[in-house]
Image (cartoon, rainbow, N blue to C red):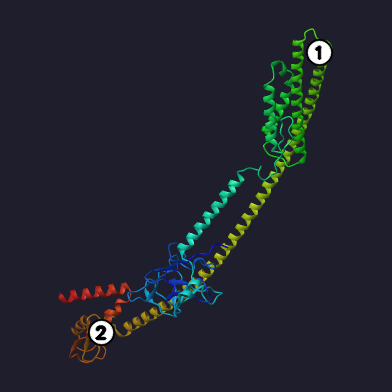
Amino acid sequence: MGDPISLDTGDRSSGLSWCLQRVGMDAEWLLLEAGSEVTVGRGFGVTYQLVSKVCPLMISRNHCVLKQNAEGQWTIMDNKSLNGVWLNRERLEPLKVYSIRKGDHIQLGVPLENKENAEYEYEVTEEDWEKVYPCLAPKSDQLMEKNKCVRTKRKFSLDELDGSGAEGPSNSKSKISKVSCEPGQPVKSHGKGEGVKQCSEYLESKLTSLDPSEKTTGAHIYPVLSKVTELYNKKQKPSNTSASQSRLGLLKVTMSRILKLKIQMQEKQVAVLNVKKQNQKGNSKKIVKMEQELQDLQCQLCAEQAQQQARVEQLEKTFQEEEQHLQGLEKEQEEEDLKQQLAQALQEHQALMDELNRSRKDFEAVIQAKNKELEQTKEEKEKMQAQKEEVLSHVNDVLENELQCIICSEYFIEAVTLNCAHSFCSYCINEWMKRKIECPICRKDIKSKTHSLVLDNCINKMVDNLSSEVRERRIVLFRERKAKNLS
């Protein structure tokens, strides 16, 4: 569980507070702070960030804005959201401010096909602060601060892991004991590499203190020391096996014995030289005996060196086998880590695919709803077009049957009504009266002519709704007749 997000209580220890109470939930209420503008959406920079788990695009980036007007009353405005804001089950017009009151129902977005209610539905309420505070949703800036703290903690934990891992495998594995190489002291357990290094340094320091004549006898120790030192440089990883520890202990004890024998040889050689100097004519038997003891010590030293050489080779072989075994274990561990990483990657991929499938289904549901709305709009548009065509056809019938001049078979141009109540074009009846002074329809004598402005205005307005060809033809006829009247 993450750390709880602390909400800024300010000084609201008492009093009433306005908020949007989530319908059917005792959490994720939206606080309406007096004197501030509250923005709601799925994007960054809003007061309350709403990220839908069912349909991510149901809530727009900046869905709506709530603020107080000059009188202190709370208002709501749809900020051109895709799926709209609904106040008391009626959709609000975008960018238009509406007043809200206690008990009003606010809905953000639309319900999906298989659900009756939308995901985000709220009720405007004014409650005591102590009741409102535990149910409030965290603000966007508080969520961002929490995520920043979590990332910082995670970074610190990773740094600690790296620091503990940098200490190397020597801290997680048991160390091999170190044995002192000084003569006459008990063997103590320390690190394997440190013991070999200390023994080699101690022996080298002792050998360098010998006389040139004595170094020739101790020359056999150098190959052993060089191999041990080379083995120490090669083997950096400690071993946990008891066999390696025992062999290393034997190696150090043998080196200590070799050093003791070397010291005894030095003492014998010094004693032989002193005896030869003090008593050149002394007992030759004593000198021979001391030389024999010196030769025995040299033989014993050579035997110890041979035995030590064999143990060094055996120890080197054991170290090689252990190194191969450790390499095999490391390879198996790397393969196991790769398998775990692959399994985790597959799980993340599967979760991502599931999320994409859910989003695709939600998108399909929204698209289907929009398609239905488009089909309904298209049907209504087709009905309106059909009605319009029917009205136009009716107008054409009226124009052709009632508003045409019987003489020129055109719509009345400057209509004139005779005393017999029949109407004709002014130009047509004048031309007719040049031959006969009687009505072309009823054959009554023409005694009077009256211009009919009502017919002219009605025909002009109806012709404006007809095709452009009819309007142009009427204009041409009007100009031609006017020109004939002037001539």
Q: Which of 295 and 405 is in front in this view?
A: 295
Residue 317: percent from left, percent from top: 76, 34
Give the residue at x 52% y 74%: 26
Give the residue at x 21% y 80%: 427
The answer to whether 119 appears left or right of 179 in the picture is left
Q: Name the residue under label 1.
A: 287
Q: Do labels 2 and 1 touch, CB within 8 Å?
A: no
Residue 374: percent from left, percent from top: 47, 72
For the C terminus, which image quadrant? bottom left
Q: Quadrant of residue 287?
A: top right
Q: Tell us which disc is closer to us: 2 or 1.
A: 1
Secondary element at image label 2: helix
Indicate the amino acid at tag 1. Ile
For the N terminus, which image quadrant? bottom right
Secondary element at image label 1: helix
Q: In which quarter of the image is residue 193?
A: top right
Indicate the amino acid at tag 2. Leu
Mark 2 surroundings within 10 Å by alpha-carbon count, few (fewer than 14), some (14 through 19), many (20 or more): some
Of the residues under marks 2 and 1, which one precedes in the sequence? 1
Instruction: Name above or below for residue 67 compared with residue 166.
Output: below
The answer to whether 271 appears left or right of 359 in the picture is right
**Can you see residue 410?**
no
Marks 2 and 1, how far apart at CA: 166 Å
Q: Name the residue under label 2.
A: 455
Q: Quadrant of residue 39?
A: bottom left
